[in-house]
């Protein structure tokens, strides 16, 4: 099976380790204001920021410490099509490996947020625009930055608290296998699952058509990708 050598993936993981502890000073929330927010609401705010800023990670070098951390990571923005927001991948590493970066918001139980009885599922995902034909198995890796709000001098800032590095090809294969095993299919580049009415037709032994499928709104969510190393990382941070 073609993929990055395990030793090369470990080397990537070591080169990204300096990112741990990086403070994203572009967002600050007064500590006393947190009681008005649920964790999911804060996650939307932080993830929106991450979605825009992580693909431009060099802009986080707002102080000498951050600049040194980013320099050691060896990441540079991958050339993409101008104006194409969802271009793949996000970065090229100095080793020549290609890296896709995803942010995973982790709730901080020490902060006084308005917590509901049940938690919402993390929204980070590998979207349908990342398909097998776009992946270079021997060069592509997935980097997940676990981000958590932490308090400093009365204000809360997002910090990168951990990183995970995974074989991209394995994650995508596991993602697509889950769709197939659930009875889902791809229609014109859109992953779809059998609708409720389609399930009833299937139970009656009737043949399904394209109209019996609906878009899989949970497709690619990291929590739902059955790749053991990825699941272990998510479980370590309470995301499962």
Image (spheres, rainbow, N blue to C red):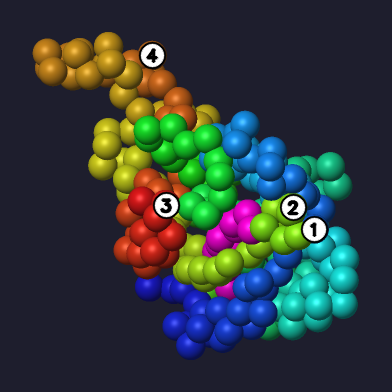
Secondary structure under badge 2?
A: strand
Q: Which residues are magenta?
A: 139-150
Residue designated by label 1? 25
Crowd class of label 4 (few under 14; some 14 to 19; many from 20; radius 10 Å) = few
Of the image marks 2 and 1, the number of the one nearer the N terminus: 1
Q: Choose between 192 and 25: the one closer to the eye.
A: 25
- The quadrant where residue 116 appears: top left
Tell me where residue 4 appears, x and y as whole percent.
Answer: 50, 77
Identify the residue under disc 2.
155
The first of marks 4 and 2 along the sequence is 2
- Residue plotted at (13% across, 18% down): 203
C-alpha span from label 3 to label 4: 34 Å
* Left or right of 133 in this view: 186: left
- Observer-side mark, 3 or 2, equals 2
Q: Secondary structure at mark 1?
A: loop
Residue indicated by mark 3: 239
Instruction: List the residue tagged with mark 4.
Output: 211
């Amino acid at each position: 099976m073609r993929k990055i050598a395990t030793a090369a993936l470990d080397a990537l993981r070591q080169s990204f380790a300096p990112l741990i502890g990086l403070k994203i000073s572009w967002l600050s929330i007064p500590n006393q204001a947190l009681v008005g927010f649920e964790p999911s609401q804060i996650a939307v705010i932080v993830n929106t920021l991450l979605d825009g800023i992580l693909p431009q990670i060099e802009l986080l070098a707002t102080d000498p410490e951050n600049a040194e951390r980013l320099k050691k990571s060896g990441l540079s923005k991958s050339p993409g099509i101008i104006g194409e927001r969802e271009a793949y991948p996000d970065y090229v590493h100095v080793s020549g490996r290609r890296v896709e970066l995803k942010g995973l918001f982790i709730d901080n139980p020490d902060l006084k947020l308005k917590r509901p009885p049940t938690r919402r599922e993390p929204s980070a995902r590998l979207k349908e625009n990342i398909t097998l034909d776009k992946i270079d198995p021997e060069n592509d890796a997935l980097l997940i930055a676990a981000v958590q709000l932490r308090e400093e001098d009365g204000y809360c800032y997002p910090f990168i608290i951990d990183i995970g590095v995974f074989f991209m090809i394995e994650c995508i294969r596991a993602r697509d296998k889950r769709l197939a095993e659930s009875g889902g299919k791809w229609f014109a580049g859109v992953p779809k699952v059998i609708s409720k009415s389609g399930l009833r037709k299937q139970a009656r032994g009737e043949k399904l058509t394209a109209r019996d499928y609906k878009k899989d709104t949970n497709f690619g969510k990291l929590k739902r990708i059955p790749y053991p190393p990825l699941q272990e990382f998510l479980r370590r941070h309470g995301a499962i």
